[in-house]
Image (tube, rainbow, N blue to C red):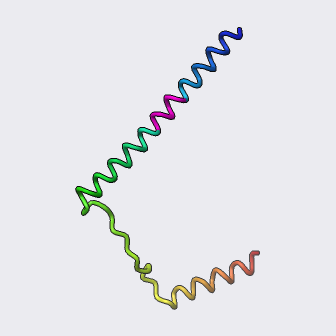
Amino acid sequence: MTEQINSGIELMFAGMGIVFVFLIMLVGAINLMSSLVQRYFPAATPKFRSESSGLDKSTVAAISAAVHHYRSKHH
């Protein structure tokens, strides 16, 4: 019976090792593809805007006041 348990444990660690190595290879491949796309196709990479969402200050103030009022009533 102990031989079967030892064999099962060895098989479990072998399977976990194979999965771990595969995941490391997958992460490496994704990073490699990402760097290749950024290098050879710079137009395909998204450009993030550093602007605000376009809300004016009065809208932001109204939303902030509504959230504050809700929290003061329900907290």
Can residue 20 be found in the magenta stretch?
yes
Can residue 54 be found in the magenta stretch?
no
Reply above or below: 2 against 49: above
Reply above or below: 19 against 53: above
Reply above or below: 12 against 21: above
Q: Which residues are magenta?
A: 17-23
Q: Which residue is farthest bottom?
A: 58
| Residue 46, quarter of the rendered image | bottom left
Query: Residue 25: percent from the left, percent from the top?
Result: 42, 38
The residue at the point 52 percent across, 91 percent down is 58
The residue at the point 64 percent across, 80 percent down is 67
Query: Residue 24: percent from the left, percent from the top?
Result: 46, 39
Tell which of 74 and 47 is nearer to you.
47
Tell which of 72 and 34 is nearer to you.
34
Majority secondary structure of magenta residues: helix
Query: Residue 47: percent from the left, percent from the top?
Result: 33, 68
The quarter of the rendered structure image containing the C terminus is bottom right
Tell me if 40 is positioned left or right of 58 in this view.
left
The quarter of the rendered structure image containing the N terminus is top right
Query: Residue 4: percent from the left, percent from the top?
Result: 65, 11
Tell which of 72 and 52 is nearer to you.
52
Reply above or below: 17 against 28: above
The residue at the point 34 percent across, 47 percent down is 32
The residue at the point 23 percent across, 56 percent down is 40
Tell which of 57 and 12 is nearer to you.
12
Number of numbered discs: 0
